[in-house]
Amino acid sequence: MEANPSGAPGLKRSLSVWAAVGLSVALMAPSMAANINPQASALTAGRAVPLTFLIAAVGVLLVAYSFVRLCQYFHHSGSVYAFVGATLGPRAGVVAGWGLLGTYTFYAVVTASAAGIFGTAFLQAVGIWKNPPTWAPFILLAVALALALLLAVMPARRGAGVLLSVEGTTVALILVVTAVVLVRLLAGNAPGHEHFTWSVFQVTPGTSFSALFLGVVFGFLSFAGFEAAATLGEEANQPTRDIPRAILGTAIFGGVYFVIVTAVEMMGFGTGPAGVKVFTNSPSLLGDLGSAYVGRWVGDVITLGTTISAFGCCLASTVAAARLLYALSRDSAGARGLGAALAAREGIAAPGTEASSGGPRLAVVRDEAGGS
């Protein structure tokens, strides 16, 4: 089935389920999130950081189920723009679409900044740039944004493969370090005489219900981007099968990954007040654990991996934002907006010019079971 049967500019179906998984995993950036997000949860929830991520995982799976059900009926590069537009109306869909577009756009800039910060820290740690000035991260930020723009214009299939490979390599390294830390905790020879304990899933006495759920907020933020595969609805070979699998699979993987990794992180630092304080002040949780439990070089490698993960998230955000902007522009009313420029470039009538009203035109494609 064609992505847009009206004859407007369309997207080519050429992506497998792994391309969709690559975009969602890269935008979620589990390796970067596991390094810098749990500290914020610890500020309010104390040692119960893994519990906050477990609660967040349950909530995310409920949201993921909604995406899965919608993706089984609609495949559209506009993601929530199409879903909300088809269920609540075009105007609500436009608001949702622009909201998500803004999120992906600003997230690209923020994660490029993270790449600059971690990249500078890595260069300083290995002695390549011993005394970087305060503006050094901005140079790497600019490089990250320029490189993301360059790679974003590559064929989607190739770019998604790069995203999945980069993030997968970093996650694999993190899991190896996590396994080493866990083995040493179980063996009783961990630094600082830390040990394995289930208390990380118990709220510290005196912690309020609201403080616990404030920590859950940062758990939710760690899953941000798991829905990105929905923007490939017009490019996947079998969208009603592959996109739901990619979204649900990424959400399940993220839930298991974050709960296990944060539990080992908290046990590795220690569940007492002193350990929690060091945990919250750590600039890179897994980098510090790798240095303490394995060797300093491991911490440096993880810092490099986190830099690459942040860049991958920037690239994935750019790719997803581009598709959202494309969908919004293509469906814009009349000659206003970027849809006219896209149409002119293709040598066809501007999308929406046939509409008699001034409202947005939402061309949502449904699968064969749902009708068109």
Image: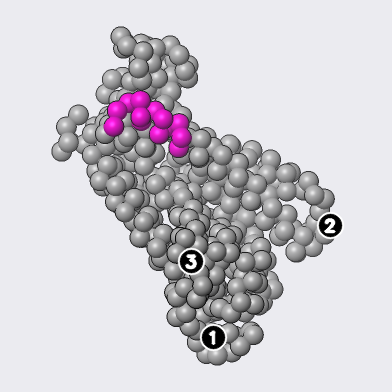
Judge depth for marks 2 and 3 and give the one in front.
3
Percent from the top left, x then y, of residue 227?
39, 47
**For this rendering, which residue is in front, 280 or 103?**
280
Percent from the top left, x then y, of residue 287?
63, 68
Does any portion of residue 170 appear in the rendered image?
A: no
Q: Are marks 1 and 3 in contact (CB under 8 Å)?
A: no
Q: Are marks 2 and 3 in contact (CB under 8 Å)?
A: no
Q: Which residue is mark 2?
A: 131
The type of residue carrying mark 1 is His
Q: Which residue is mark 1?
A: 195
Does any portion of residue 71 appear in the rendered image?
A: yes
Q: Which residue is mark 3?
A: 208
The type of residue carrying mark 2 is Asn
Q: How many marks?
A: 3
Query: What secondary structure is found at the residue carrying circle 2?
Result: loop
Q: Is-magenta flag for residue 91?
A: yes
